[in-house]
Amino acid sequence: IEHRLRQSDFRDDAGDPATPWLGQSFNDLENNQAVLLVGSWLRKDQPMLNHRVRKSVLAGGQVMAVNPVDYDFNYELSHKLISAPAEMVAQLAGIAAALGADTAGIGVKAEAEHQLIADTLKAAEQGLVLLGSIAQMHPDYSLLRFLANNISQAAGVDLGFVGEGANSVGAWLTGSVPRQGNGLSLGGMLEQGLDACLLLNVEPEFDSANPIAMADMLKVAKVIALTTHLSPWLEETADLLLPIAATAETSGSFVNLQGDVQSFNGAARPVGEARPAWKVLRVLGNLTDQKDFDYESSTDVHDEAMQSIGEIKLDNRLGDSQIQTTSFETADMQRIGGVPLYNVDMLVRRSRALQHTPDAWKAGLHVHADTAGQLGLTDGESAVLRQGEGELTLPLVVDSRVPPTCVWMPMGVPGSELLGEGFATVSLEKA
């Protein structure tokens, strides 16, 4: 069972925290003197959390960032290190070096900006190092997490994780992740292949770390898809399609980032033959002679889950890390991935209203003006992005937020299914 579908680096699964969480209460976010964002566009990834962080800035706190894009925030960053994805590990190692912390063997010298960030964190009575969703999608996530942990310990501040989706903590608590060799991680599945797979509200071409590898694996497996929406890919690939209710059409429970269990009721009846996912799973369990699949309501599922979990204990401490060398080498041209605000799941991707807002991703390949000039490309001109055996032609967008030698082309958007991992070596040329 695996829910980390947009993660690509599983080399240090043995060092996973027991239950990754925010690291602080929501109220505490407002009282930090210093926050370091690592691989995070918090304003768009988690707007309500960002609102709390903004309140800390208005009270005199400082926010800093290590990011692959100079994302816009609704407060000023006191310090920021914007670099190509392959250089993010070295940037974080520089901060660790400035604090005298373990740099995972990465030979870097702390520059002035590294030292300023380190000093700001260390001077804070209350602070936070926060790993965002972009860090978790990075091919060197293991190293970023290890370094962020070392920085937080050396500076005496908290370590936090911004999970993907509303129920990431709940997924960890209920065992929706392989533990100690009990099952394969997504990386293991892609490497070894599967004979059969049950997809729960997943569009593999938009919701996975490597849509090409995912598609190749599922094309040779038996696929049962429980889904709220149809797509051409699912209709072509799935052996069995079962309609399930959307979030607002079912009751259930989530566990939020600070560990609160939040239950809700359905606001509308499921459409047509759709049924709540828990009911469909219950029937599948009965048909395959599984024990204890006699739930009569989502409350029964909630009660059994809470009994299994016991007292909710949130713990960001890392285990014995098996740190590897960096897997993402500096290249002539690098792709920057991530997932835009209104492309995170199949529901918002299909909302015409949301897709017409300013925050919706407009089709284009975003590059720095220097990169465009070196390639002889101009704003609005068609360009070809090649990644492995995949390629994509889109208009060029000159964007000063993007570092030189990089192309910002997110995951989860139309066209991204033709490419591989969100962070990778690519080439760009005139169409």
Image (spheres, rainbow, N blue to C red):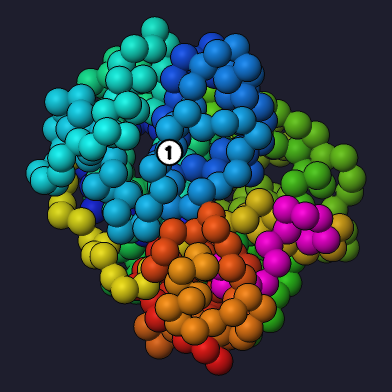
Q: Is residue 141 magenta?
A: no
Residue 392 place in picture, x, y as percent? 54, 84
Left-right relation of 339 to 423:
right
- Work out whether 58 lies above or below 65: above
Decide whether the magenta segment is chiefly helix, strand or loop: loop
Residue to which mark 1 is pinned: 80
The residue range painted magenta reads 355-366
Left-right relation of 268 to 257:
right
Residue 136 place in picture, x, y as percent? 41, 48
Q: Residue at x 17, y 32 (%)?
A: 97
Helix, strand, or loop for circle 1?
strand
Residue 164 visible in rendering: no
- Work out whether 202 lies above or below 300: below
Q: Which amino acid type corresponds to the residue marked 1 in the rendered image?
A: Lys
Left-right relation of 265 to 149:
right
Q: Is residue 361 magenta?
A: yes
Q: Residue at x 15, y 40 (%)?
A: 109
Residue 297 place in picture, x, y as percent? 72, 37
Residue sitting nearer the eye, 375 or 335: 375
